[in-house]
Amino acid sequence: MSLRPRIGLLTGDPTGIGPEITVKLLAMPETREQAEIIPIGERPVPDVPLGKVSRVAGAWTLANLRLAAEAIFGGEIDGLVYAPLNKQAMKLAGMQQEDEMHYLADHLDFRGLCSEINVADALWTSRVTSHVPLRAVADLITEQAVYDSIALLSRIRGSARIAVAGLNPHAGEGGLLGTEEIKFIRPAVERAKADGINVSGPYPADTLFIAARRGDFDAVVTMYHDQGQIATKLLGFERGVTLHGGLPVPVTTPAHGTAYDIAGKGIANPGPIKAAFALAVTLSALGHANARPRLSGSTPQPLPESQSAASDSPRPTPLSQKHPEPPGPQ
């Protein structure tokens, strides 16, 4: 690795605010001082209308993600930052994976655990399930799934004080309001403790983030997407970052979406992508030692475009069951 980490940079979906905030990021003098920036993207950029979901834009986005995977394989970059993408556009273009994290994982031939981790200043939050329908969540809460989420967050965050949220109101109220805490969540917490992880819970989710904001915890494991996302975005939406935890190199993105309502107006806040860039630089400069597993296989290659669905190939192990995402902008 060079003295400055090499950070790949994608402008995101061209129909949203991604290009604007990328330009604003590059205009900051401190950006180029922190890292060697490697722009990644096919040329020309497609001519698509702003503020509308586009299959063409989705196809261009997927092509750029494949280029990023090739750069990672080739040792050309130490980390990756991308501006917001649009899942519906990528689905229209043929993406069959749950989201861009799993799309990248497939093209990296990565078969380990990976999970989205949200970072709001000093507080890190992961989740056991992610982009799945709410009706499916309870069936996906298992002792192994909860343990995996705790272990991955501990591996990346080091000696953090980790709190685990319950699934049900009042963390189940001793079984009166649900038994997932008794059957699955608490056993996973105790197992992680036995492995030396500084973890406690399960706690009622409605008050857990009050304690976390107070500084009682460094990281929180939640059970489903909005349980953690609502809290972390309220705590720091202007600085929120999503880290694709577990992948072979640090991959970060702003925690917000494509913001179609303000696309092209020149008023998008670059704060979140600045924070995403800073986190990628920090983790890359440290060698990402706690979160960089080896790529599987001796000479892995990115999947060809025709195999983007990876129907018969070994798939990465997600921390949530894969379900199709309902249509709608990101």
Image (spheres, helix red, strand yellow):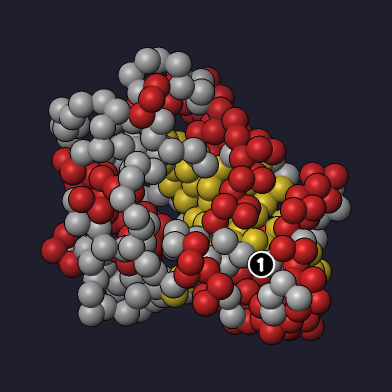
Q: Is residue 180 above or below residue 230?
A: below
Q: Is residue 2 above or below residue 246?
A: above
For the residue pair 302 and 322, the one nearer the viewer reads as 322
Q: Is residue 227 above or below residue 316?
A: above
Q: Residues within 10 Å of mark 1 (few under 14, many from 20)?
A: many
SS of the residue under disc 1: loop
Q: Which image quadrant is residue 321 in?
A: bottom left
Q: Which image quadrant is residue 160 in?
A: bottom right
- Does residue 15 appear in the picture of this structure? yes
Q: Residue at x 77, y 64 (%)?
A: 170
For the residue pair 196 and 284, the one nearer the viewer reads as 196
For the residue pair 294 and 279, the one nearer the viewer reads as 279
> Could you say where residue 198 lies in the image, as x and y percent from the top left?
80, 69
As drawn, the residue found furthest toward the front would be 176
Q: Residue at x 56, y 28 (%)?
A: 271
Tell me if 241 is positioned left or right of 266 in this view: right
As drawn, the residue found furthest toward the top would be 266
For the residue pair 4 and 24, the one nearer the viewer reads as 24
Tell me if 174 is positioned left or right of 178 in this view: right
Tell me if 232 is positioned left or right of 270 in this view: right
Residue position for label 1: 167
- Does residue 1 appear in the picture of this structure? no
> Could you say where residue 298 lies in the image, as x and y percent from the top left?
34, 78
Indicate the quadrant containing the C terminus: top left, top right, bottom left or bottom right: top left
Tell me if 179 is positioned left or right of 130 in this view: right
Number of numbered discs: 1
Q: Which image quadrant is residue 86 in?
A: top left
Q: Residue at x 52, y 75 (%)?
A: 140
User: Which amino acid, by three-letter code, is at mark 1?
Assistant: Leu
